[in-house]
Each structure stands twice: as structure tokens, then as C-alpha cells.
Image (tube, helix red, strand yellow):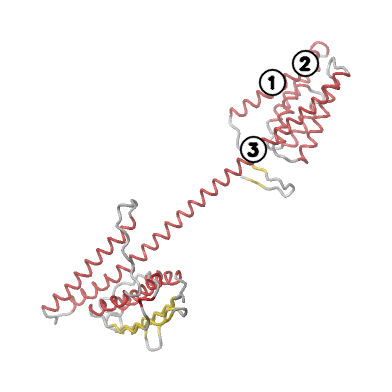
Amino acid sequence: MRQLLPSDRQPVFSPLPISRWGHTWRILLVIVLAAASWIEAGIWQWQNLRWWFWVDLAIGVAMTVVALGRRRHPLTVALVTNAATFISFSSGGAATLALFSLATRRRWREIVPAGLVGLGAGLVSLRSAPGSQEDDFIVTGPALVAILGIIIAWGMYVGSRRELLGTLRERAETAESEQAARVAQARTGERTRIAREMHDVLAHRISTVTMHAGALTYREDLTPAQMRETAGVIQQNAHQALVELREVLGLLREGPGDAAPERPQPDATAVHDLITEAQSTGLRVEASIDIDTGAVPQATGRTVYRVVQEGLTNVRKHATHTAAEISITGAPGEGLKVVVRNKLPIGQPVNALPPSGLGLIGLRERVELAGGRLERHVTPRRDFVLSAWIPWPA
């Protein structure tokens, strides 16, 4: 997780949690560095000023404990541990670790004061070390500066590396979440498309079956020939509904070889067959098509077909005994206007199908995706009008 501080333009990534082994080897490293910097001075203290030996050791242990909080208070811990090396040689390990940890943040306004304190404490320690000579100080002074420079440079490199890894990790997580979102969106869109196709296909067939089954139920004056004809229509539409249902459900199969290729989708030329089929089932339909259906683009023609199909399905479901009027007009560059009009029935039809409320919603979505608009309203003369305008490129 990256947090950008207003006082610094440098982005800083929150450090990852350190494992138990990570804490262990860091403490061991502090002990080794403290022993290396204190061993000579510690021997002299033990032989000459034993109280200083114990004070130095106590301060070194205290600074090691303080160094454990370098992640919460990096600047404070670095200043305290490096300042302690003015009087304590054994604090060198904790001071080195704290300065290195501070350098990983790559903030010069923090590194410079802590580095100056460490440099000053190191020069004083070298000058006051037992057996130190003026000539030795000339050599060890630049060496101390070089060591501090290496510590700071190494810490900044590690910090840069951490930031790079954090950036890559963040990008990977973002890309993974975006990919999951795209997959979910594509899956939802595909399910919506399949649901819309199932409604468009099955509602038309089932409404025809229901209408003729209702006629067999309530009509007592049908001749045997009429009953056989009606039963034939029911059988034909039920069979066709099963075939089309199998084709649509085939799209839900996961394996590419499980589903048959998607059947050719209807276009504007199929509107004539749709109207003829509706008339053959007993629905009174008057059509006025003033366009060349063969010249309509396939995608636009498919939308026209679905509008007419949904209009006839609604007439068959909710206004069986009324006549439907279909009008299709337009021209390239002007767009296509499709109007399906029927009288509202008086009272509730005897065998009316329950409204699903999804047909017109899906149809509106289909028309809007094609760049058009869909409207429905009831005129003062109790005509239900379903009209759609669909763009027809010039």
C-alpha cells in the first residue's frame, strides 16, 4: 500500500511485515557490528575504567531495544542511536541498523541530520578511542565518511528496490482485479443477451400455443377438421419452440464442441414471414412495409424483426381478439420507424397470459444499443402504440 505524504514528493511504500527469522538475523547483525566496534575499546574499559565498561554495555543493550522501533519512528530512533555512540562504543550496531533503515525511506531531509549526527559521533569516538594517534585519525576519518556513505547508499538502493517491487505488486493486483471485473462484465452481458434471445424466441412461440390451446378449451363449436388444424398448429409451434430453445441453451455450454454453431439471426427480410406466420395462426394483422427490406443492414434488420416480433407477441398475449397494424417506413440516412398498433381489449381476456414485464425492457435495451429509441403509449382512442426509431446509415 502506497501513501503519498504532502510534505514530500517521494512516494513511500509501507514496509512489509518482518518474519521472525527477519528479526532474528537483524538482531544478530547488530550484535556482530556492536562487538566489532566495541571489542578494542571494551578491553581497555575493563582494564582501566570498569564502570565505563558496564555503562557502555547498558547503553548498547538499550539502543538495541530502541532500534526495534525504527519502523514506527525512523528519524527519532536514528538520531537517538547515533547520538548514543558519542559515549557508547557498543551502540554502533544499533546506530548502523537505524541509519540504514532510515535511508530506505529516501528522504534527504531526514537522512542528512541523522547522517551528520552519526558522522560527528563517529569522529568523536575515533578521536577518544584508546590508543588513537593523530596519524590514525587522518586515515580513519575518511574511512568513516566512506562507510557512512556506503550505508546510506545501500539503504537508498534497498528502498528503491522495495518501491519498485511495491509498484509492480500494486499494478499486478490492479490488473488482476480489472481482469476479474472485465470477465464478470462480459459474463453478465452474455447472460443478458442469451436471456433476451430466449425471451424473444420462446415468448412468440408459447403465446401462439397458448392462444390455440385456449381456443380448444373454450370453443365448443369447432368442427373436427378445425380441431385437428388447431392441434397441428400447437404441435408445430411447440416443436419449433423446443428446437429454438435447444439452440439458445447450446450457447451456455462451456466446451467449444458442445454447442452447435449459432443459427443465422433473422433480419428485415424475415419480417414478411413473421407476419404471414402470425396471420396463419389466426391473428388479424395488417402490414404496411414501405421499404426494401433486402437493403437494410443485417444488424438494423435484426432489431426491426425483434420489435415486430415483440409487438405481435404482446398482441397475442394481451389483446388476442383485436387487430394489429404494423407500419415500417424510412430511408437510408433518415432511419427506420417501426410502429405496431392495436386496440386495447375491453375487460380482462379469459385466457390472458401473465405479463412478465421483461419483454419491453429487453427490447428497449436492444433498440438503445442500436442507437435508436423505443416508445410506448396509449392514445385517447384506446390504441396501444409501440413505436421504435432505428438509425439506418446512408
Q: The N terminus appears in which quarter of the rendering?
A: top right
Within 10 Å of disc 2 (Cα), the crowding (few <14, some 14-19, many 20+) is many
Secondary-structure class at tag 3: helix
Q: Residue furthest top?
A: 47
Q: Earlier in the sequence, mark 2 or mark 1?
A: 1
* Residue picked out by circle 3: 161
Residue reaching furthest to the right: 134
Q: Amino acid at mark 2?
A: Gly
Q: Indicate the position of residue 21 as horizontal and vertical percent values.
A: 59, 27
Mark 1 residue type: Val
- The quarter holding residue 184 reads bottom left
Residue 293 coordinates in the image, percent (x, y): 36, 77
Structural distance between the alpha carbons of marks 3 and 2: 38 Å
Disc 3 to disc 1, C-alpha distance: 26 Å
**Residue assigned mark 1:** 32
The residue carrying mark 2 is 42
